[in-house]
Image (cartoon, coloured by chain):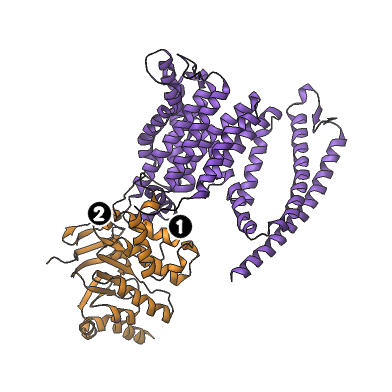
Amino acid sequence: MTSALELQALRKSFGKTEIIRGVDLSIARGERHAIIGPNGAGKSTLFNLISGRYECTSGRIRLNGEDITNRKPFEINRLGLSRSFQITNIFHNLSVFENLRCAVLWSLGYKYSFWHRLTALKDARERADEILEAIGLASRRARLAGLLTYAEQRALEIGITIAGGANVILLDEPTAGMSRSETERAIQLVRKVTEGKTLIMVEHDMGVVFGLADRISVLVYGEVIATGTQAEVQANAAVQEAYLGATHKEIASA
Amino acid sequence: MRYEPVNIARWIIWGSAAAVMAVLPLIFSQGFAITLLSQMGIAIIFALSYNMLLGQSGMLSFGHAVYSGLGAYIAVHALNMASKGQLWMPVSLLPLVGGLAGAFFGVLFGYVTTKRAGTTFAMITLGIGELVFSCSLMFPEFFGGEGGITTNRVFGQPFLGITFGPAIQVYYLIAIWCLASMALMYAWSQTPLGRIANAVRDNPERAEFVGYDTQKVRWFTLIISAFFAGISGALACINFEIVTAENVSAARSGSVLLAAFIGGVGFFFGPIIGACLFVYFFAALSDHTKAWLLYLGLFFLMMVIFAPGGIASLIMMQLPVIAKKRFKRLVPAYCAAGAAGLLVLAALVLTIEMTYKVSVDSATGTAMKLFGIEFDAATAGPWIVAAALWIVGGWLFNTARKRVTSTWGEIQAELAESRA
């Protein structure tokens, strides 16, 4: 069986600075995979490469076996990969419902249609309402997305990401900036809406990572230094070195 | 079959729009009024087509006259061919020719302009606008050079007694096309493409990540917008029986931006108000004063600073207050502010007109007549009156403005409380 997502010797440089330095990663279908690592390790850059926001300097990316290296974001999305953003990225001047309806239109085949009336598109409405229910924003249906609370906007962010029915979901720090109870709810939401899908997430909160992920990759200075289950990663000498080594150096220099 | 509730409000709105358009020329039946109404109909289509770009898709165009103007040029040539019998085409269908021509140039130029969004888009439209305008002087066979291309809308046998000779027949032709265009453009805003255009306006990046090629969304939207701009161009060709380089000029592009903005780009009906007001300004003021552009500029400035959402947003702000039956309390404050505003306006008009008289127009003497009063702008008296008007009007207006603000604040607080 081909992997849901496969990265081969992926590299990305900005000018002379190499941010991603040869990443190889294979993620199986249905797997929940977390990417962790210190700040500036290149986690978000990796997501931007996979989703087509940045061009790769070299290497290959395959989605369900198909080469998607340096394709446009909308092409990659149409092939079944959808992503969320670390900084909330929604349609601020549209209602919550319209945000979700916009996110389902392409996948339902309406494309650039100007001969369908939106109100007559029962499937788009039902799908949008279904997602609205799933992300717990049914009571905010008609509110402008820009007026939602931060946690609600994060939920909508996830809603937009999953609405199109993509089978590979990339979530970039879905719980960033949330309180403890909001994080709990967000984890449940992510677990519920990614049921049966491949999930790849960047996350700082280890509680979230250990609660959700089947496997974990540790990214340090643009390289994956370890991939495995929670126990494997925790026992890995290189990971301990990377996480604890910094502490030793800090202590030494103090 | 799915049960779909009949949208009564929608039928009432469109029905009354049609009724108003049908009845207006019967009430204002002077030749001048009919001309004005015809121009308003043309301007409404043009402004709405412009707002498809600006308000609905976030594309600030400085060259929209290219599409209406080239639509008008193609239409004028088609009309001339038809009157010579080289082409079968009734005058009533000429707007369709203009629309298709507009759309054709939308396909052509739009492919270039919509490659980019934002400031770059605005700059490219400016460039295309200048390009087409300079072409109009370079190719006199097609554009008619300085004098433009003239035509005659009356030819062949009258159909059911309609020759399109009398202005009133032209008005009704414009009214029908205007109503149809309004309905179609509204319908467009309720389609998948229309909604995605809103999404692209709000956040182009996210639109790409839900599967949309934003470049195509902008391009397709521009083509449709150019189609309606072309319709307005062809109607202008029928109405004026002449098309000149002015039709594709930057000035024309600028005025549609002004009209749409004054009306309000955030609401579908905003540009309709803007277009009517703009035509009225143009026709009524340019006859009475040489400084009419100055007034228009000042008005635009005031709108941008104090009501950036345009007149439509001012109207929409009142609706919740009216719905909660609290508008009555605002009426006295509004009336006071309106009266004081008139005083300030009188002061402004007096100052501008006297300045014009003294500085630009003094060759014919400095005696002048304003508000039915004759006086000499070179004497101190009227200037003292103007100064007094400024002081009194300004003070009154400021007081009234505070009253409006405080009443408005009270009502908003009450409404917020009743919601909580």
Residue A183 screen position, x and y as percent: 39, 78
Colour purple maps to chain: B
- Pointer 2 with pointer 1, Cβ within 8 A: no
User: Which chain is home to disc 2?
Assistant: A
Q: Name the foreground residue: B171 vs B8.
A: B8
The answer to which quarter of the image holds residue A193 is bottom left
Q: Is residue B63 visible?
A: no
Neighbours of disc 1 within 10 Å: few (<14), some (14-19), many (20+): many
Residue where numbered disc 1 is placed: A94
Q: Residue B215: percent from the left, percent from the top? A: 35, 46
* Residue of label 2: A71
In the shown orientation, is residue A177 left or right of residue B279?
left
Secondary element under disc 1, as helix, strand or loop, is loop
Q: Amino acid at mark 2?
A: Arg
Q: Quadrant of the C terminus of chain B?
A: bottom right
Q: Secondary structure at mark 2?
A: loop
Q: Amino acid at mark 1?
A: Leu
Q: Nearer the viewer, residue B400 or A250?
A: B400
Q: Residue B306's x, y, as percent?
A: 64, 51
The orange one among the chains is: A
Residue in the foreground of this view, choosing between B57 and B115: B57
Q: Is residue A117 above or below residue B210?
A: above
